[in-house]
Image: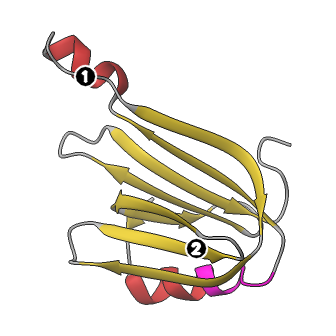
Amino acid sequence: MKPIEIEHVQQQLESFIHKDVYVHLETTNGAYASHFNDKAYNVGAYIRNARVNFTQAKIIGDGQSYRVGLKTQLGWVYAEGLTDWTMHQENQLLLAGHDQEGRLMVALHISETPLGQ
């Protein structure tokens, strides 16, 4: 993975507009929080192979971290805190957010085929 290049990522996001795609979206502070602070509250969200079709895609950010929003017919899907990206295999965009120690905090994976297939 490499640091997000906003123009390149925007182009990749737009390549999925008006297509049925599969989304994996995950957030976690998981074990990172509880191992080092017994008062920390673990949070996380996980969705895999949700089939969506979005009409708009946008990446914004300040050069440190970014937010990606995908506008669907009924609302928005978004991931915040993204720092890195890569095109993985054929037509699979992987975006991730890592903390200062390199630990995964958020992942957004968009693919034209179901993930893990």
Gap between marks 1 and 2 measured at Cα: 28 Å
Q: Residue at position x 38%, y 69% from top?
A: 67
Pick whichever, 66 or 56, lies toward us. Answer: 56
Q: Is residue 84 left or right of residue 9?
A: left
| Residue visible at 49% across and 64% down in the picture | 78
In the picture as drawn, the residue positioned furthest to the front comes out as 74
On the image, numbered disc 1 is attached to which residue? 41
Mark 1: give few (<14), some (14-19) or many (20+) Cα within 10 Å. Answer: few
Residue 96 vertical placement versus 27 (above, below): below
x and y, in percent, of residue 11 in the image: 57, 88
Residue 5 placement (x, y as % from top left):
38, 80
Q: Quick one: quadrant of the N terminus?
A: bottom left
The amino acid beneath tag 2 is Leu
In this rendering, the answer to whether 10 lies above or below 103 is below
Q: Which amino acid does label 1 sit on?
A: Tyr
- Residue in front for this viewpoint, 79 or 74: 74
Number of callouts: 2
Residue drawn at the location 72% of the way across and 76% of the way down: 73
On screen, residue 43 versus residue 1, left or right, reads left
108, above or below 17, in the image: above
Q: Which image quarter is the C terminus in?
A: top right
Q: In x, y percent, where is residue 10?
A: 51, 85
Q: Is disc 1 placed on a helix, strand or loop?
A: loop
> Magenta part of the protein: which range?
12-18
Res. 65 image quadrant: bottom left
**Do the residues under discs 1 and 2 have CB atoms within 8 angstroms?**
no
Which residue is denoted by mark 2 in the rendering?
70
The image quadrant of residue 6 is: bottom left
